[in-house]
């Protein structure tokens, strides 16, 4: 199990996500951003918009996805 923060994934806060794969924590971050948007949290809006556009342009976002996967792979396992 690894830990990555909202900030590590391009967000503004230090909320921690725990998961065994990069996909797990990316999905957790996606949920977190959606909830922040629903709650009217403006600090997360930019990250939320960036994530939305990634889903819309998956091919253009491959670089971000690969980088995030690589960064996740270097995290210590706990
Ligand atoms: Zn956050």
Image: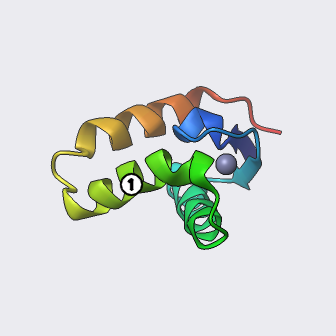
Residue 21 lies, in percent from the top left, at: 57, 52
Residue at the spot x=30%, y=54% of the render?
Answer: 54
Up-down: is 22 above or below 64? below
Residue 22 is left or right of residue 7, and the answer is left
* Front one among 53 and 38: 38
Up-down: is 21 above or below 67? below
- Name the residue at the right extreme: 78
Residue 43 lies, in percent from the top left, at: 60, 46
Residue at the spot x=50%, y=53% of the render?
Answer: 45
For label 1, the SS is: helix
Residue 4 lies, in percent from the top left, at: 68, 40
Residue at the spot x=83%, y=39% of the render?
Answer: 78
Residue 32 is left or right of residue 73, and the answer is right
Colour scheme of the rendered structure: rainbow
- Residue indicated by mark 1: 49
Residue 65 is left or right of residue 11, and the answer is left
Up-down: is 54 above or below 34? above
Across the whole image, how many numbered discs are drawn on residues? 1
Q: Name the image quarter holding residue 74.
A: top right
Q: Name the image quarter holding residue 3.
A: top right
- Name the residue at the bottom extreme: 38
Residue at the spot x=37%, y=49% of the render?
Answer: 50
Some atom of ligand 1 lies within 8 Å of the CB belonging to the residue at label 1: no
Residue 7 lies, in percent from the top left, at: 63, 35
* Front one among 63 and 7: 7
- Within 10 Å of disc 1 (Cα), the crowding (few <14, some 14-19, many 20+) is few
């Amino acid at each position: 199990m690894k830990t990555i923060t909202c900030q590590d994934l391009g967000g503004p806060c230090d909320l921690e996500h725990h998961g065994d794969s990069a996909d797990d924590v990316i999905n957790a971050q996606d949920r977190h951003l959606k909830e922040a948007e629903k709650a009217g949290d403006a600090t997360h809006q930019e990250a939320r918009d960036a994530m939305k556009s990634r889903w819309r342009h998956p091919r253009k976002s491959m670089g971000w996805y690969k980088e995030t996967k690589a960064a996740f792979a270097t995290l210590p396992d706990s």
